[in-house]
Structure formats: structure tokens, C-alpha cells
Image (cartoon, helix red, strand yellow):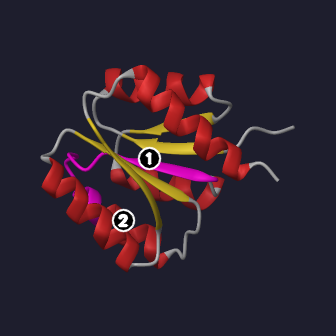
């Protein structure tokens, strides 16, 4: 059975690997992007079942949220960021208002157990 693809964007390689390893442990095939252009191209070519966004990128994570809405994306969108909780919740509400299926938000640094629990629950919703 193929694993659902989790497309994630984070400009910090160590944190991207941390999230990718947690996703792999939960049955996802992680795809890591560090730049917004790569994210957009990979999103279109791979059509991932789930997306994880870091808001604190050189490009605004909210801009990528709008891109996903423009693409009529229906998979879960997880926000993982070190921003203040109010900023995370605002981005979450914006995603919902744009019609996205938002999950999280998760504040960095996130404990591995918390991340794996969330990803496992989301993975279960993606299995036919």
C-alpha cells in the first residue's frame, strides 16, 4: 500500500528533518522543500495528501496558505511554527476562511510524542 505524501516546507534543515522523521515514523512519505518556488512546483507535480507549513519563512507562510486555497487543496494543512500563539491562530483561522482543512497549529519546539500523535491521527484519516 502506498504511503500518503506529506509535503513540508521549512527553511531550517534540522527542523525539516525532525518533522520528516516523525512523519516517516507515522507512515507518511515526507517531501521536504526549503523554498517557496520549490514548494509550489512540488505541490503541483506530487499532489500530496497532506501539507505542513512553517510560517516563519523568507516567504510569508500565509502566502502559501493562499496558494493552497487557490489550488482548491482539500488535504489537511498543518501549521508548525515558532511564532507567537496568536499569530498561529490567526493563520489557522485564515486558512479555514479560505476553505482549507487546517490542523494544529503546533508551536516550535514541538515534542516528538506530540507530533507523532497528531500525525498518526491524521494518517488514519487518509487511509481509504
Circle 1 crowding by C-alpha within 10 Å: few under 14, some 14–19, many from 20: many
Residue occupying the point 35% across, 62% down: 64
Query: How far from the left and from the top, in percent, is residue 61?
Result: 28, 56
Placement of the N terminus among the 4 image quadrants = top right
Which numbered disc, 1 or 2, marks the residue that appears first in the sequence?
A: 1
The residue that label 2 is drawn on is 65
Q: Is residue 59 magenta?
A: yes
Query: How far from the left and from the top, in percent, is residue 101?
Result: 50, 65
Whether 73 is drawn above or below 123: the answer is: below
Q: Is residue 23 visible?
A: yes
- Residue 52: numbered disc: 1
Query: In the structure shown, which secondary structural element does the residue marked by tag 2 occupy?
Result: helix
Q: Which residues are magenta?
A: 49-63
Residue occupying the point 50% across, 51% down: 51
Q: Is residue 62 magenta?
A: yes
Whether 2 is drawn above or below 114: the answer is: below
Q: Is residue 17 visible?
A: no
Query: How far from the left and from the top, in percent, is residue 54?
Result: 31, 45
- Residue 68: numbered disc: none
Nearest the camera: 76 or 58?
76
Residue occupying the point 21% across, 64% down: 90
Query: In the structure shown, which secondary structural element does the residue marked by tag 1 occupy?
Result: strand
Residue at the extreme right: 1
Circle 2 crowding by C-alpha within 10 Å: few under 14, some 14–19, many from 20: many
Q: Quadrant of residue 72?
A: bottom right
Nearest the camera: 32 or 83?
83
| Left or right position of 6 against 12 | right
- Measure the alpha-carbon separation of dots 1 and 2: 10 Å
Amino acid at each position: 500500500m502506498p504511503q500518503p505524501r506529506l509535503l513540508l516546507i521549512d527553511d531550517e534543515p534540522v527542523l525539516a528533518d525532525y518533522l520528516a522523521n516523525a512523519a516517516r515514523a507515522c507512515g507518511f512519505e515526507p517531501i521536504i522543500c526549503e523554498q517557496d518556488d520549490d514548494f509550489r512546483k512540488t505541490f503541483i507535480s506530487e499532489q500530496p495528501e497532506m501539507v505542513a507549513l512553517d510560517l516563519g519563512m523568507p516567504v510569508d507562510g500565509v502566502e502559501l496558505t493562499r496558494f493552497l486555497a487557490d489550488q482548491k487543496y482539500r488535504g489537511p494543512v498543518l501549521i508548525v511554527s515558532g511564532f507567537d500563539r496568536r499569530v498561529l491562530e490567526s493563520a489557522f483561522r485564515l486558512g479555514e476562511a479560505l476553505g482549507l482543512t487546517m490542523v494544529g497549529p503546533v508551536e516550535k519546539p514541538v515534542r516528538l510524542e506530540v507530533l507523532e500523535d497528531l500525525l498518526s491521527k491524521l494518517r488514519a484519516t487518509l487511509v481509504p
